[in-house]
Amino acid sequence: MKIKAVIHPAEEGGYWAEVPALPGCITEGETMEEVVANLRDAIAGWLEVANNRQTLQSNDRVVEIAV
């Protein structure tokens, strides 16, 4: 899966990043490498929480779609 993130320089140094498609998914890092690694963790965590929050009805089906 590929998802777009926007990385911004932070005023105090380092970087902060957001994922527009995932509201509230933000992170920061001192270096570009660190902020990218933190983005991977933040996206994985966001998706895990979103998947666990769903309540299913008795006639609902769960499917996995590869993108």
Image: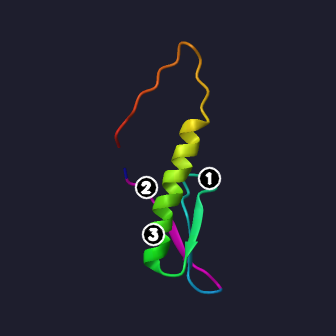
Residue 49: x, y in percent? 58, 44
Above or below 17: residue 24: above
Answer with mark 1 or mark 3, whichever residue precedes in sequence.
1
> In the image, is residue 39 above or below residue 15?
above
Look at mark 3 in the image and give the residue it sits on.
36
Separation of marks 2 and 3 at Cα, in angstroms:
12 Å
Q: Are marks 2 and 3 in contact (CB under 8 Å)?
A: no
Q: Is residue 10 magenta?
A: yes
Q: Helix or strand or loop: what does disc 3 sit on?
A: helix
Within 10 Å of disc 1 (Cα), the crowding (few <14, some 14-19, many 20+) is few
Q: Mark 2 is on which residue type?
A: Ile
Picture quadrant where residue 58 is located: top right
The type of residue carrying mark 1 is Pro
- Label ID, residue 23: 1
In the picture, measured across the screen, residue 51 lies left or right of residue 36, that is right
Residue 21 location (% of width, % of height) = 54, 52
- Helix, strand or loop status at disc 2: loop
Q: What quarter of the picture does the C terminus occupy?
A: top left
Q: Which mark is residue 3?
A: 2
* Residue positioned 58% across, 23% down in the render: 56
Q: Is residue 30 magenta?
A: no
- Residue mark closest to the camera, 1 vs 3: 3
- Main SS of residues in magenta: loop
Q: Position of residue 36 (x, y in %)?
A: 45, 69
Camera-side residue of 3 and 33 = 33
Give the image quarter of residue 32: bottom left
Q: Is residue 3 above or below residue 39?
A: above
Q: In this picture, which residue range is highlighted in magenta? A: 2-11
Task: Name the residue rendered at 51%, 67% in the picture.
Answer: 6
